[in-house]
Amino acid sequence: MRRPGLSVTTVRGFTAARDTVETLRRDLLDDRAQVRADAVYDLSFLPSDRSLPDLLVAAADPDERVRDLVARGLGRLGDEAGLRTLVHLMGDPVPSVRAAAVDAVVLFANRATPLLVEEVTRLTTAEPAGLRLESALTALGRVGDERAPAPVSTALRDGGSAARAAAARALGDLGLSEGIPALRAALADPVPEVREAAARSIVAIAGPAAREVIEDYIARETDLRLKERAGALLRR
């Protein structure tokens, strides 16, 4: 039976009357951040052909809560037209927004890999690379695509210190043997955080087979704190 004005909730979202959508769009222009945030949240449950353009505009909202909800909403919609905006949000100055954008990109799985590879390749040689490179590396590691080790390994070699640490962690998340050579080289990195991340990732990938490599690293490591942490990896 049909009833006028009925809203139907589904797994993918809900339908809404045109006047309701127009109200939400007006709310996106409200001076109050909470009103804008509520509008973004509600819009993100509508089909993307009705909500995506508005969410893309709201991604530039001055309020971090709104941007966070935009990132989550774009992930929920799953429309690839929102991927570039999500990649942009992965460089947001607010950590929670960056994390929400990474979580959303990961929902796209392998569909996000080409764009993430493009960003990592481009930003590895950029000055400054910024926060987006670290987020893109994290996302690539979590997506787990076989196309990822090569650009991530390059970032581990040529990126800035924070990016190198993120790349080392990403290779561990990927869990692919192709990442081992770059990680072994990173055990001599001048930055302690990178060396520690590389050691952890080698163990994560190789398991007991990593013992000889890690023991050799421990013998050469000059940081007593890192020596102990590497030893703990072998005792697990």
Image (tube, rainbow, N blue to C red):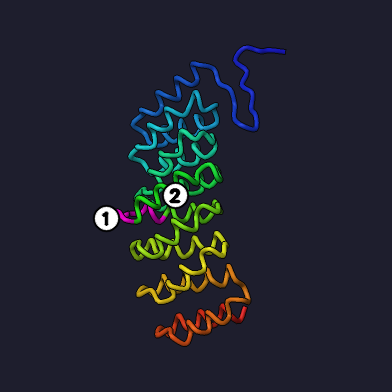
Whether residues under marks 2 and 1 lie with C-beta atoms below 8 angstroms apart, the answer is no
The spot of residue 197 in percent (x, y) is 47, 70
Question: Residue 127 — which label?
Answer: 1
In the rendered view, would you say 218 is above or below 98?
below
Among all residues in the image, which is located at the extreme left? Answer: 127
Among all residues in the image, which is located at the extreme right? Answer: 1
Which residue does the numbered mark 2 point to in the structure image? 117
Front position among marks 2 and 1: 2
The spot of residue 12 in percent (x, y) is 61, 31
Residue 57 picture quarter: top left
Q: Secondary structure at mark 1?
A: loop
- Horizontally, is 7 left or right of 156 in the view? right
Q: Nearer the viewer, residue 152 or 81?
A: 152
The spot of residue 219 in percent (x, y) is 47, 87
Residue 225 picture quarter: bottom left
Question: Residue 31 — which label?
Answer: none
Which region is colored magenta?
Answer: 125-134
Badge 1 amino acid: Glu
C-alpha span from label 2 to label 1: 18 Å
Q: Is residue 164 magenta?
A: no
Graded by Cα atoms within 10 Å as few (under 14), some (14 to 19) or many (20 or more), the crowding at tag 1 reads few
Q: Nearer the viewer, residue 88 or 98?
A: 88
Q: Quadrant of the C terminus?
A: bottom right
Q: Nearer the viewer, residue 55 or 149?
A: 149
Residue at figure coordinates x 41%, y 41% from the top left:
67
Instruction: Assign the magenta stretch its main secondary structure.
Output: loop
In the rendered view, would you say 165 is above or below 28?
below
Badge 2 amino acid: Val
Graded by Cα atoms within 10 Å as few (under 14), some (14 to 19) or many (20 or more), the crowding at tag 2 reads many
